[in-house]
């Protein structure tokens, strides 16, 4: 079929509008996400349970063509099966895709994320040169994913991490801090994890490393600020 492609991607005002919102720099929904969107918000629960794989891949294609995206935030429900999560993330952020937008913030919230699910988006995350903030809040993350995050730190510019509301122990923290680039972290949120003496000792060992850039850390109900004030929000 000939003719020029439509400026507005098919589906933005159809089924996609029920589980995603593209917003412009004025925080207003845009009908032309490829040229105007700077943020994207996705309802992962709706997407996981009602949207066919073909539509997910079409959505991934639109995301890959965006020019200005700086923020991607995904919110779900913890009872969605892990294999569904992996399929969704692979469809949205395809490993063989090419992305040219200046993404700075990537967030998944309230979505049970196992190691395979997180590994599905590693090629996407490590291809984003401007990415500096990773938020995985209330994702039931354990030590295996924490260790993989440490690997991602060594391949990206991420220096702000929010791991609030997860299940990370001293072993996971040790893996997270083992990468050579972990010392560049400026903020780290570990609230609502099972923090005991072993975890505190691991954090103390990390803070004693030479060259640690950390300026803000939250542990349990405690927030510590080092040097000049820095607000990760």
Image: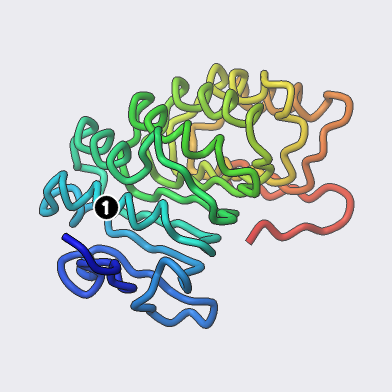
Location of residue 145 in the rendering, given as x and y in whole percent from the top left corner: 45, 26
The residue drawn where x is 20% and y is 53% is 47
Q: Residues within 10 Å of mark 1 (few under 14, many from 20)?
A: many
Answer yes or no: is residue 218 visible: no
Image position of 139 (left or right of 231):
left
Q: Secondary structure under badge 1?
A: helix
Location of residue 191 in the rendering, given as x and y in whole percent from the top left corner: 54, 44
- The quarter holding residue 53 reads top left
Q: Quadrant of the N terminus?
A: bottom left
Location of residue 146 in the rendering, given as x and y in whole percent from the top left corner: 51, 27
Location of residue 94 in the rendering, given as x and y in whole percent from the top left corner: 36, 38
Is 93 or 224 nearer to us in this picture? 93
The residue drawn where x is 53% and y is 21% is 147
Image position of 18 (left or right of 66):
left
91 w.r.t. 61: above or below: above
Question: Which residue position is annotated with label 1?
Answer: 44
- The quarter holding residue 83 reads top left
Is 134 or 218 nearer to us in this picture? 134
196 w.r.t. 217: above or below: above
Is 117 or 171 nearer to us in this picture? 117
Answer yes or no: is residue 177 visible: yes
Image position of 165 (left or right of 131):
left
Q: Residue furthest front?
A: 2
Image position of 159 (left or right of 148):
right
């Amino acid at each position: 079929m000939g003719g020029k492609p439509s400026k507005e991607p098919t589906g933005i005002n159809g089924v996609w509008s029920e589980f995603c919102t593209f917003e412009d720099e004025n925080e207003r929904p845009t009908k032309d996400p490829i040229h105007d969107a700077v943020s994207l918000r996705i309802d992962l629960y709706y997407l996981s349970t009602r949207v066919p794989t073909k539509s997910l891949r079409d959505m991934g294609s639109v995301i890959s063509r965006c020019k200005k995206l700086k923020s991607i935030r995904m919110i779900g429900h913890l009872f969605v099966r892990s294999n569904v999560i992996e399929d969704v993330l692979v469809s949205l952020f395809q490993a063989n895709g090419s992305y040219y937008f200046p993404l700075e913030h990537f967030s998944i919230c309230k979505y049970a994320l196992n190691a395979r699910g997180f590994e599905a988006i590693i090629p996407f995350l490590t291809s984003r040169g401007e990415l500096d903030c990773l938020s995985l809040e209330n994702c039931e993350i354990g030590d295996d994913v924490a260790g993989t995050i440490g690997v991602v730190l060594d391949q990206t510019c991420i220096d702000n991490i929010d791991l609030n509301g997860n299940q990370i122990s001293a072993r996971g923290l040790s893996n997270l801090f083992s990468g050579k680039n972990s010392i560049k972290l400026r903020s780290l949120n570990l609230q609502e994890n099972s923090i005991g003496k072993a975890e505190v000792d691991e954090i103390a060992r990390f803070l004693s490393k030479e060259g640690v850039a950390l300026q803000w850390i939250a542990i349990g109900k405690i927030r510590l600020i080092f040097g000049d004030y820095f607000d990760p929000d």
